[in-house]
Amino acid sequence: MSSPSNQQVPQLGDVLWTPPADARAGCRVGRFMDWLAAERGRGFESFADLHRWSVTDLEGFWGAVWDYFEIQAAAPYERVLGSDAMPGAVWFPGARLNYAQHMVGRDEDLDEIAVIARSQSRDPRELTWGELREQVARARAGLQRLGVQPGDRVVAYMPNIPETLIAFLGAASLGAVWATCPPEFGPRSVLDRLGQLAPTVLLATAGYRWGDRHVDRREQVAAVRAGLPSLQHVVHVPYAGGPDDALPETTSWDDLVAEAGPLEFEPVPFDHPLYVLFSSGTTGLPKAIVHGHGGILVEHLKNHAFSWDLGPGDRLFWFTTTAWMMWNALVSVLLTRASIVMIDGNPGWPDLGFQWRLAAETKATFFGLSPAFTMACRKEGMQPGRELDLSSIRMVCEAGSPLPMEGYNWLYEQFGPEMFLNVGSGGTDVCTGIVQGYPLLPVYAGEMSAPCLGVDAVAFDLDGNEVVGELGELVIRRPMPSMPVKFWNDPDGARYRASYFEFFPGVWRHGDWIQFDERGASFITGRSDATLNRGGVRLGTSELYGVVEEFDEVLDSLVVHLEATDDLILFVVLRDGVELDDGLKSRLSDALRSGLSPRHRPDDIVAVPAIPRTMTGKKLELPVKKILSGTAVTDVVSKDALVDPDAIEPFAAYAKSRAATTDKE
């Protein structure tokens, strides 16, 4: 293996890690390649060869995935791909199966740990596979007593705790449709999402702890109940403890799981709805994205085993709330018979070291991080690699937004040259990765190693031509099993088609601005609708953030380009005690001019208390742009969908003062 020299800072595309000589024999995607040679007569010398086959012979590849993982089906499929139309692909017609059946381990796993739960609201908890099976069977029986049938919607206003997982699997085992919102969401955001589904059962907690603070949610739960007239039952899950941990006129969790029942699984069609995920909802009603049992099953088996290299004996640690698709990806780790760490509470309390200490304590082998968190740790000068025993961690994964080059280098400083850094990008829409790393490929500084297996991802220019070596729209040219079954309440599919297929007919447009090189490696510079374009020079917003947020004085930033006036406005969050004086403005402008281009010097730099972010940590670039262009805040953003609902106000005030100045001129 190789690592960067201590004397030389790696540059874009430099190799930070190379697979060991025995990588093929030692990783799961390599063993899959050996299986293909032995069982299918298909020998592949390289990952590139395997990927090429996976996107040109969809039936051969996905049929092999089905057989390799020994997917259990009550009725066999007639063929792998009944139609390859996009949209409208038909996968595994005739098959009847159940995702939950594959989530409860095998008989030989019963005494092994499946779930480790850590929380700021209650004591640590662990579940063996045997205990998980029993609890899922009890939850299934309880939901049946409440009248839940296939196709009914069971929803949760719950944190990332074992009861949420158990209820999800119980509902899925019945063929019910699942959806969830975290308890930090306000009632409007919850109703904007769950209200679309007309659910019959709601599970909720009365409160939780956020660090050292108790958060009472009884009033919010009452508002949600009142806004869901379809509800027939509400289940209270005790969590925060104390006399206030109660909800009136509810079924208790203990009553729900009081009676034992058989661990059975309703066979459903491959595309039967498993759960509904929601877009951020910062502009308009969130898209209700329906994912199917079969699509999620085969995709997550492929992704988690082949890219994340997970299997029995592994343990995945990745902080997420139930608002983010990463919760769905987290729990699907159980498909590989690896265990998961479920974490709830304030991820930065009492300090940024909390997650690092917990990863060391739980002996995680796989550590998932967000780039924003990683860069915050780096900026604070943290050295977890020196202060903690992180030797159990063999893979670190980064996703959620582009990871700056400095983040790659800092992580290798912490973990050393043996660690495999897997940087990827995907999305809620496909509930998986689109580009990421594999243990058979090198890790390149600042880049994601390859398109994922079975994903025909390339960059298009605006005319729909593939481009290499230049930025373009991230597109997927052939169907994937985990592309949405549909949008809820979109009977003719018009909203679905408009979301992904309107720009390039017959081709999925994902909405990211990406560049691939000749090796297939790539980097993303931000959302394509937020790309800066001045004087014909197009830049992703992440490139600007990479320059600005290297300043010690700057904690966070957001940039928008207003085409009508050709103004570039930079907003910055400064450290306590730092003033945005002319000197700092000049240094920021000069750094952007020299680091990017003269056209990307901002026309105005504005200090704000916080950058508005969604609950999944994404900056509100497009909504802020619309507000600065004159659109009312209420028309472009739901405050309940923000981490800090008040963070948008300074932007509205700036827009108002800017408009007043323009009017005077």
Image: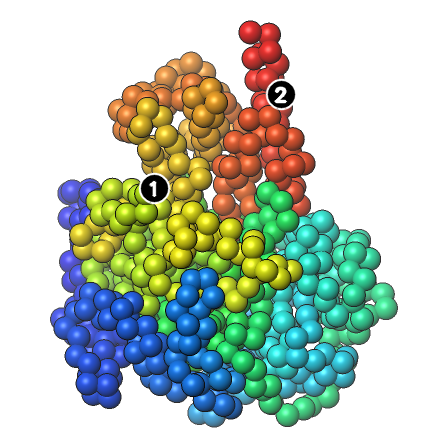
Residue 20 visible in image: yes
> Which amino acid type is shown beneath numbered disc 2?
Lys
On-image quarter of the N terminus: bottom left
> Measuring 64% from the left and 92% from the top, which residue is drawn there?
262
Comparing 61 with 394, the one in front is 61
Which residue, given by chain and number where applicable, does mark 1 sit on? 462
Residue 26 coordinates in the image, percent (x, y): 23, 76
> Which amino acid type is shown beneath numbered disc 1?
Leu
Contact (CB < 8 A) between labels 1 and 2? no
Please tell me whether mark 1 sits on a helix, a strand or a loop: loop
Residue 396 coordinates in the image, percent (x, y): 35, 60
Q: Report the disc number at residue 656.
A: 2
Residue 467 located left or right of residue 347? left
Residue 260 coordinates in the image, percent (x, y): 69, 90
Q: Report the disc number at residue 545.
A: none
> Measuring 50% from the left and 64% from the top, which residue is drawn there?
484
Q: Earlier in the sequence, mark 1 or mark 2?
A: 1
- Seen in the picture, residue 646 relative to 183 is either above or below; the reply is above
On-image quarter of the C terminus: top right
The extreme top residue here reads 665
Comparing 574 with 563, the one in front is 563
Quarter holding residue 549? top left
- Seen in the picture, residue 466 relative to 366 is either above or below; the reply is above
The extreme right residue here reads 249
